[in-house]
Image (tube, rainbow, N blue to C red):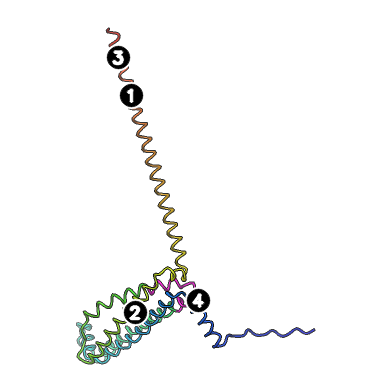
Amino acid sequence: MTTPPNQPDKKPTLKEASKASTDAAAKRPEAVQYMLLMWLAALILEGFHQLVSIALSLLNSEQLMATARRAAGDNEGLPEVSIKIAAYGSVALSSLIAFGIIALLAYFLSQLARNSNRAGLGRRMWFAFSLYFGFRIMLVFLARPAGANAEWLFAADGMLQILIGVVALMGLMFSVKEETLKHTGEWEEMKKLEAEARRKAEDKAKERAEERRREEERRREDRRRDGARGRGAEDPERAKENAQD
């Protein structure tokens, strides 16, 4: 008999992968689904916000160069080329950091969507950034355009930041629901921590009760000794009085 050759592992097709993703989404609780949609929208809008911020910096190049000259301070002899490199380099560096944070948030959102071992960490990370996005709404009303060019773009960027904050906070509201915490596995961890904290509190209460009981016994023993000493001091005096009588 001839044994059949080893069949290579069959990779899932795009249709099968899409179906598996759809089935996984269908198994998610409703709160988790809304949370993911809100945070995905916030992530996409944050990407647009960073692009608009870069465009604003480039359109207001005069203000950007003036800021670079002020940062140079005493180095007034620097050539114009060096100032330009410093100015546009700062824009490039800040943009790189911003898109790096967006990539990190996208990674944690994917871990949360797949409900991996890092799902709880991803939820907590997005929880913190949602608070930041919400706080940033207040800063929008305090901001002023850095230059006179493209004020409409500055207004559009402000509306984008407000929308990001609102959407992120909506996702945050869904992220703290019980079904969401159960989906990420954090609910069991929270219950364990609560049980541990309750057990420690009970142990401390027992220790305090035991200390009070020992203190009460010590006080009763001291009163008993004081009473015995008092009776011992009274007996010789009575004996003397009886002898005199």
Q: Earlier in the sequence, mark 1 or mark 4?
A: 4
Q: Does the magenta portion include 125? A: yes
Q: Secondary structure at mark 4?
A: helix
Q: Secondary structure at mark 3?
A: helix
Q: Amino acid at mark 2?
A: Val
Cβ–Cβ below 8 Å for labels 1 and 3?
A: no
Q: Which sits earlier in the primary sequence, circle 4 or circle 3? A: 4
Q: Mark 2 highlights which residue?
A: 167
Q: Which residue is mark 1?
A: 229
| Residue 167 percent coordinates (x, y) | 34, 79
Q: Amino acid at mark 3?
A: Arg
Residue 131: image quadrant is bottom left
Residue at 45 percent of width and 73 percent of height = 119
Mark 2 or 4, nearer chain start: 4
> What's the residue at 28%, 75% (across, down)?
135
In this rendered view, identify the residue nearer to me: 208 or 35. 35
Q: CA distance from mark 4 to mark 3?
A: 93 Å
Range of magenta residues: 110-126
Mark 2 is surrounded, within 10 Å at the Cα level, by few (under 14), some (14 to 19) or many (20 or more) other residues, namely: many
Is residue 234 shown above or below 226? above
Q: Amino acid under label 1?
A: Arg
